[in-house]
Amino acid sequence: MNGTDPPRGPSGSSMERSAAAEIVFDRATKRYPGRTVPAVDELSLTIPAGEICVLVGPSGGGKTTAMKMVNRLIDITAGDIRIDGRSVRSLDVTELRRGIGYVIQQVGLFPHMTVADNIATVPRLLGWPKGRIRERTAALLELVGLDPDEDRGRYPAELSGGQRQRVGLARAMAADPPLMLMDEPFGALDPITRERLQNEFLRLHREVQKTVIFVTHDIDEAIRIGQRIAILREGGVLAQYDTPDAILAAPADEFVARFVGADRGLKRLALRRIADVALIPVNGTPPDVLRLHAETSLRDALSLMLSEGSREALVLDEREEAAGVLTLDQLTTLLAERPPVATR
Ligand code: ADP
Ligand code: MG
């Protein structure tokens, strides 16, 4: 997840990429009629083009409202939201929505339509020729991990929850929108399917670098998915907006500290692997201590060292050769370290 990496996706006519869009919330405010407290209160944040921004916070914090103001499913009361410098208020609403992929928890697939026809919804509306639609649908099925031949003719009722969510994702990406809105897209899935889809979504995002606004109430999902995280508290107030590493290292206030959890140090260690750390070189015969692979997360390394009662571990590279030594003291120092500015 490095914003400066060039996109490395499949190329060719059916997979052309439109540029990702920069999104600016500029004191965006929503007051629902008859309610004294705003649902979203002067929300200001900039999402760089091509990044995944996760809106996270307790239920009722205004996440869905903030997201739906972007595609104008909900009207903005005050302030503005701009996509590549253009106010969403100034755009034709149909045009606006066709340029935005939208994925929600209940997917909303058309039950009487096949998988392929569901995915082709927007391209058909845009009047794409049949051949191009077919090509695009096949490429998307493959991209989201479905079988382009077996699955294209099936109906939503014949799919598992995870498969339906994949179809929903493919449909949202069909016309290659520069922006995707995802509201708790994996919320209804079992933990294993959920984690698999999270990982595949991250892989897919590396290939097709879109700007993504992703809503969840689950801080662990936010940390795993987000390049930046915006934490919203009750009343739609932005509590903190930063990289996961920076938020875990330095929560802005008590509310954020409580929301990310007392194990925030461990969560932060989970973001990094042993391979990211400068190890102590081994001179001569490697010590006969606990052995860990360089790919192990720092959180797992700490856990294993504690449970084995060892203050140091020998780190092995992919050839099973000694790469250096990791000590408990190093992990303690890393926990206390402030993150560098603008990390991921
Ligand atoms: P979240 O997605 O973070 O759970 P929402 O954006 O759905 O939060 O809701 C934010 C606040 O706005 C809540 O207090 C909710 O009750 C209120 N709200 C949401 N939709 C409406 C509506 N259509 N009319 C009135 N109040 C609403
Ligand atoms: Mg919501």
Image: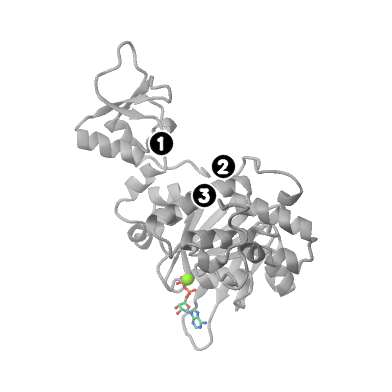
- The three-letter amino acid code for the residue at tag 1 is Arg
Q: Position of residue 107 (x, y in %)?
A: 54, 68
Q: Which residue ends up furthest to the left in the rendered image?
A: 309
Sequence order check, earlier mark of 1 and 3? 3
Q: Are marks 2 and 3 in contact (CB under 8 Å)?
A: no
Mark 2 Cα shell of 10 Å, populated few (<14), some (14-19), many (≥20): few
Q: Residue at x 43, y 61 (%)?
A: 189
Kindly report the distance in space between the C-alpha atoms of the residues bearing marks 2 and 3.
16 Å
- The three-letter amino acid code for the residue at tag 2 is Asn
Mark 3 Cα shell of 10 Å, populated few (<14), some (14-19), many (≥20): some
Q: Position of residue 256 (x, y in %)?
A: 38, 60
Q: Are marks 1 and 2 in contact (CB under 8 Å)?
A: no
* Observer able to see residue 90: no
Q: Is residue 81 above or below residue 298?
A: below
Q: Is residue 105 above or below residue 244?
A: below
Q: Is residue 300 above or below residue 217?
A: above
Q: Which residue is mark 2?
A: 2
Kindly report the distance in space between the C-alpha atoms of the residues bearing marks 1 and 3.
19 Å
**Position of the N terminus by quadrant:** top right
Which of the 4 quarters of the picture holds residue 276?
top left
Q: Position of residue 50 (x, y in %)?
A: 62, 51
Kindly report the distance in space between the C-alpha atoms of the residues bearing marks 1 and 2.
16 Å
Q: Regarding mark 3 in the picture, which secondary structure is present there?
A: helix
Q: Which residue is mark 3?
A: 200
Q: Which residue is mark 1?
A: 273
Sequence order check, earlier mark of 2 and 3? 2
